[in-house]
Amino acid sequence: MFRGATGAETVSALPTASGLASAPVEAGLYVHVAGAVRRAGLYRLEVGDRVADAIALAGGFADDAARDGVNLARPVADGEQIVVPVVGAAPSGSPVAGAAAPADGLIDLNTATREQLDTLPRVGPAMADRIIAWRDENGRFTSVDDLLSVPGIGDKMLAGLRDLVRV
């Protein structure tokens, strides 16, 4: 592993499924930084680190990066992917248009587009925007129950969405 200036590390190789037992697991957060950065890859950060720290470990923005496409101040969550878009591409909170629907038919709260969220009952464009804004500000949803933190979603609405979404 390589230790960066912020104390975080980059992971040089990932263990295979058969090698998991022999690979030590280190404390901290692991994030995948991809897109318009100088060195995309899997990085180890500390609890409390921010997207800016992850991008710094990845060598900073590439020349064609849409720097306003990511929220640098947002805390990172373990297991998330941070995608820095190139100029003219969709921001990290919006997957590529036309992406395949999940095999289970459920809408993934961590990757859904505004249009996908808008197909849910009682979720219109404004509510879809609030869900995406919450995700952009707070990181990945770790549970469907996290929807209760989105302004305008209460217990009754959550009950109606629970069987239609996943994280």
Image (tube, grey):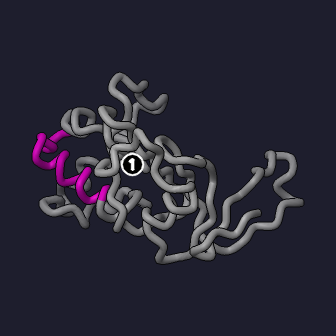
In the displayed structure image, the side of residue 36 where residue 8 appears, left or right: right
- Visible in this render: residue 19? yes
Q: Which one is nearer the viewer's eye here, 59 or 12?
A: 59
Picture layout, residue 161 above or below residue 45: above
The residue located at (75%, 54%) in the rendering is: 12
Residue 164 visible in image: no
Write down the quadrant of residue 26 in the picture: bottom right
User: Residue 56: image x %, image y %?
Assistant: 51, 62
Q: Is residue 138 magenta?
A: no
Q: Residues within 10 Å of mark 1 (few under 14, many from 20)?
A: many
The kind of residue on which mark 1 rests is Asn
Q: What residue span does the magenta drawing correspond to?
A: 120-136
Q: Quadrant of the N terminus?
A: bottom right
Q: Main secondary structure of the magenta part?
A: helix
Q: Residue at x 75, y 50 (%)?
A: 14
Classify residue 4 as left or right of residue 24.
left
In this view, the residue farthest toward the right is 22
- Camera-nearest residue between 147 and 132: 132
Q: Is residue 52 above or below residue 95?
A: below
> Which residue bears the numbered disc 1?
110
User: Dividing the picture into quarters, in which one does residue 164 lie?
Assistant: top left
Q: Position of residue 44 (x, y in %)?
A: 63, 65
Q: Which residue is drawn at the image coordinates 12% and 41% (left, top)? A: 124
Q: Secondary structure at mark 1?
A: loop
Q: Is 3 on the left-hand or right-hand side of 156?
A: right
